[in-house]
Amino acid sequence: MCPHVQDYIRNMRPYIPGKPIEETRREYNLKKIIKLASNENPLGPSPKALVAIVDSLRELHRYPDGSCYELKQALAQHLNTVPSSLFIGNGSNEIIDLIIRAFCIPGDFILTAQAAFIVYKLCAQIHGAKTIEIPISDQFQFDLMAMVEQIKQNDKIKIVFLANPNNPTGTFFDHLEIRKFLTEVSKVRQGAVLVVIDAAYIEYLTHDNASDPTLLFKEFTNLIVLRTFSKIYGLAGLRIGYAVGKEELLSTLEKVRQPFNVNTLAVIAATHALKDQEFVKNSKEINTQGRLFWEKNFVNHGITFWKTQGNFVLVNTQKSFGKSGAEVYLECLKHGIIFRPLANYGLNHALRISIGLPEENQVALDILMSQKDG
Ligand SMILES: Cc1ncc(COP(=O)(O)O)c(C=O)c1O
């Protein structure tokens, strides 16, 4: 046993990403592979972002602009806020890590729900903080008022993390629920508990009651909202996301980040992708159609599933095929379809399918349905 490692690091299990295409190709010797495992944009990056990246390649000998001036200006205009209410990170994952680094000490707690995005718990562990997870219902409903009670009882809880919509459950909170939650949390210990709402999939919401919490920080000073360019903007490979909140909070993150935490190409791509709202609109449309395709076919084939508001759908493999999510995942992998098993979320009976292009969805559905017979 390595004597240099702290117990809280030794006990960690690393993040398990979606299986990469090249790895699958190597292991299974397959020509055609469809990856529907990491909630990526199946359309690729915005073409405008690609052109801008190519134009900037000659400047790569320079360090990036650590302040991300242009991107912050563009984002501030896009969101109707001021640049000082923005913080840019190396993907929203980095910002989750920085928030815990900045606002927790070892022995503190973060609060979230079962089956919440797993990176909250992993980052807490890295910093020696503990995670309390509030149970969720069979239908994956989060109990926000149980969270408030927990916060009242435990003054070591420093941060609450909620994803809206959540990955992997695809569930969301409506405007009234969020507002009530924020109001209640603000009353505890004079608003000392920070709330982080992770809105990585916010652009995909179609439900009438869904709403965007991004600007609620103007009312709730203990709120940080996370957004990303990895999903609808199609830039997951470049690693760029941002936080929106009060300057007092975000200036603390500026202190604890690396001097050049976001690379030049990522900043340029994000700035141009932001201007390409036509691409964002198309991406949403493809996703909404894809979600309807899967839902319609699940109903037609008698598949049990959970409705989601993200760019992914969730199948109950145990009820639908009498198999665990991992078993169905492995069988489909042999046919070149990469889905995402969710055992690390305690959801052994579920499989997550990212929504692809129409032709990808059709091929993946056919392979998935062959599990009924096997
Ligand atoms: C809820 C949620 N938040 C954050 C992220 C990470 O996004 P990024 O690529 O910006 O680090 C993901 C990625 O899957 C996610 O599902």
Image: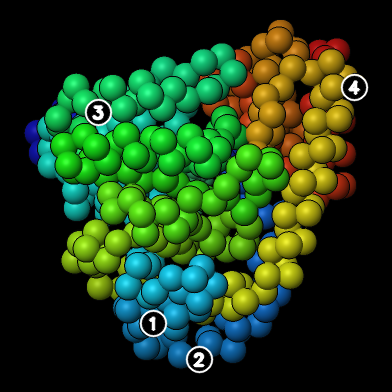
Q: Which image quadrant: the C terminus? A: top right
Residue 331 position in % (x across, y down): 72, 24
Mark 4, Cα crowd under 10 Å, few <14 / some 14-19 / many 20+, is few
Q: Gap in Å between the C-alphas at discs 3 and 2?
A: 51 Å
Residue reaching furthest to the left: 3
Q: Which mark, by number, is residue 300?
A: 4
Q: Which mark, by number, is residue 158?
A: none
Asked if marks 3 and 2 touch (Cβ < 8 Å), the reply is no
Could one spot residue 57 in this view of the protein? Answer: yes
Kind of residue at badge 1: Tyr
| Residue at the disc numbered 2 | 58
Q: Is 74 left, or right, of 131 in this rendering? A: right
State which tag comes first along the sequence, 4 or 2: 2
Q: Is 168 left, or right, of 126 in this rendering? A: right
Kind of residue at badge 3: Ile
What kind of element bears circle 1?
A: helix
Q: Which mark, by number, is residue 151?
A: 3
Residue 161 position in % (x across, y down): 36, 39
What kind of element bears circle 3?
A: helix
Q: Gap in Å between the C-alphas at discs 3 and 1?
A: 37 Å
Asked if marks 3 and 4 touch (Cβ < 8 Å), the reply is no
* The one of 233 and 175 positioned closer to us in this rendering: 175
What kind of element bears circle 4?
A: helix
Q: Gap in Å between the C-alphas at discs 2 and 1?
A: 20 Å
Q: Residue at x 37, y 88 (%)?
A: 62
Of marks 2 and 1, the one in the foreground: 1
Whether 362 is drawn above or below 90: the answer is above
Could one spot residue 89 in this view of the protein? Answer: no
Mark 2, Cα crowd under 10 Å, few <14 / some 14-19 / many 20+, is few
Q: Gap in Å between the C-alphas at discs 1 and 4?
A: 51 Å
Q: Which image quadrant: the N terminus? A: top left
